[in-house]
Image (tube, rainbow, N blue to C red):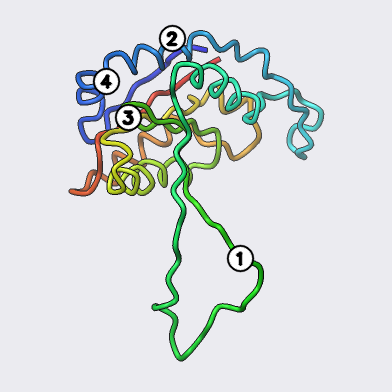
């Protein structure tokens, strides 16, 4: 794979490149080492492209894990403790089996968080505008990198996969807030 685009959210490119030189070098090397064609294995069952062979998001995510984990990049999980104090009028959650909810970040190393996202645009926006802020507040990271496909790659995946160009437009229209952390968005192609 190769890097096709970089977008700086909240001064993310400058901050990440200055504070995390070796980590960025590892991420760039990992991206270049992954042969996307090995993961063009998903047969489409969609009406608009039946039988077409597409890139597998599951396979690509596993390739990132297999490439980054040996370098010390770790998945970070944070258990969620949900409160009952906001229910109204005496409502109580039904007593069923215990729920152990969590949030997780794909990878983190030396306070740099990384999400690899081949899903809907809402997940990309959630990662950068909510999850990364939460993980900063919990002390896991101080900056982030979001790795997403560019349009050319997304068109060779299932319908509905968002892409770099759309994501950048959304972030440009949203602007930044005082709670946003620096995030470098990397658009990748096959």
Residue 98: give its label.
Answer: 1
Mark 4–mark 3 distance (CA, rounded to whole Å): 7 Å
**Any mark on residue 64, and which?**
none
How many numbered badges does the structure rendering display?
4
Q: Residue at image x 44%, y 76%?
A: 84
Q: Around disc 1, counting alpha carbons within 10 Å, would you say few (fewer than 14), some (14 to 19), or many (20 or more)?
A: few
Quadrant of res 128: top left
C-beta proximity under 8 Å, tags 4 and 3 = yes
Q: In the rendered structure, which disc, 3 or 1, sits on the residue that comes first in sequence? A: 1
Q: Residue at x 61, y 65 (%)?
A: 98
Disc 4/disc 1 C-alpha distance (Å): 40 Å
Q: CA distance from mark 1 to mark 2?
A: 42 Å
Residue 20 bears which disc, if any? 4
Q: Position of residue 157 (x, y in %)?
A: 64, 29
Q: Residues within 10 Å of mark 3 (few under 14, many from 20)?
A: many
Viewport quadrant of the C terminus = top right
Residue located beneath label 2 in the image: 29
Residue wearing tag 3: 112
* Residue at disc 2, secondary structure: helix
């Amino acid at each position: 794979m190769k890097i096709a685009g970089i977008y700086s959210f909240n001064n993310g490119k400058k901050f990440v490149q200055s504070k995390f030189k070796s980590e960025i070098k590892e991420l760039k090397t990992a991206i270049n080492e992954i042969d996307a064609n090995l993961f063009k294995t998903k047969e489409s069952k969609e009406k608009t492209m039946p039988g077409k062979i597409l890139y597998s998001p599951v396979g690509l995510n596993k390739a990132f894990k297999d490439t980054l984990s040996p370098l010390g990049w770790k998945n970070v999980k944070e258990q969620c403790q949900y409160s009952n104090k906001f229910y109204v009028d005496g409502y109580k959650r039904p007593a069923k089996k215990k729920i152990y909810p969590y949030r997780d970040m794909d990878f983190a190393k030396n306070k740099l968080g990384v999400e690899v996202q081949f899903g809907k645009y809402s997940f990309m926006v959630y990662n950068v505008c909510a999850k990364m802020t939460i993980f900063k507040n919990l002390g896991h990271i101080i900056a982030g990198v979001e790795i997403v496909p560019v349009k050319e790659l997304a068109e060779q995946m299932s319908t509905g996969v968002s892409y770099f160009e759309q994501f950048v437009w959304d972030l440009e229209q949203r602007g930044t807030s005082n709670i946003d952390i620096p995030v470098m968005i990397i658009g990748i192609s096959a």
